[in-house]
């Protein structure tokens, strides 16, 4: 996961997660992943809410539907764990990710000023997005 994350988050504003960070997260209760050879989604489900912790797709595999498939699989897995709402944060300037989540039915639910600190020291706002599974899933 760390290798894919490093490829997916290799920009000047990005801070890829380490193997230790992934190992620590995967040891926590409620954390689960859906994986493919070129990408993965890491989520946490607690009580009736789930959170997308990160979604990573290798640049060479983008724009082929893998991100959408992983989001869909993650949302279904969260619902199976009892979640009725899925949340995530996305950088305000990440237009491709925002479009992907909008197509999946996520809507803006808030803003976190200066949430992301990039490797270059720049701070960026995060948009808090939410998906109501009582409406989105039959």
Image: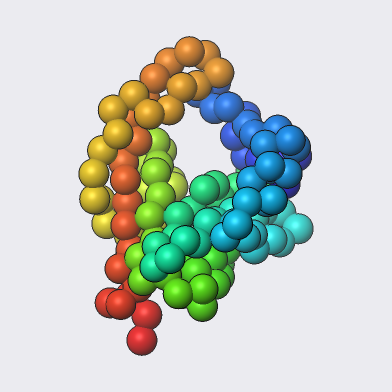
Indicate whether 131 appears above or below 28: below
Q: Is residue 99 visible?
A: no
Q: Nearer the viewer, residue 26 or 58?
A: 26
Q: Toward the viewer: 11 or 60? A: 11
Task: Say left or right for 113 vs 63.
Answer: left
Q: Position of residue 4 (x, y in %)?
A: 71, 43
Say which residue appears at 32% left-offset and 45% top-offset: 128
Relative to 7, 89 lies left or right: left
The residue drawn where x is 38% and y is 29% is 115
Q: Please give the name of the residue rendered at 32% of the width and 57% of the height, measured from the top-left corner.
A: 130
The figure's colour scheme reads: rainbow
Q: Residue at x 28, y 77 (%)?
A: 135
Query: x, y percentage for residue 63?
Result: 55, 55
Q: Quadrant of the C terminus?
A: bottom left
Residue 113: x %, y % from top left? 28, 28
Height in image: 46 above or below 99? below
């Amino acid at each position: 996961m760390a290798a894919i994350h490093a490829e997916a988050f290799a920009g000047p504003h990005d801070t890829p997660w380490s193997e230790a960070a992934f190992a620590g997260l995967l040891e926590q209760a409620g954390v689960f992943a859906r994986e493919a050879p070129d990408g993965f989604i890491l989520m946490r489900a607690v009580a009736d809410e789930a959170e997308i912790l990160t979604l990573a797709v290798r640049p060479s595999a983008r724009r082929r539907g893998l991100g959408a498939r992983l989001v869909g699989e993650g949302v279904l897995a969260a619902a199976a764990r009892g979640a009725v709402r899925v949340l995530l944060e996305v950088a305000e300037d990440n237009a491709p990710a925002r479009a992907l989540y909008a197509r999946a039915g996520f809507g803006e639910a808030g803003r976190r000023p200066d949430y992301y600190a990039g490797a270059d020291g720049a701070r960026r706002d995060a948009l808090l997005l939410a998906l109501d599974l009582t409406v989105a899933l039959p």
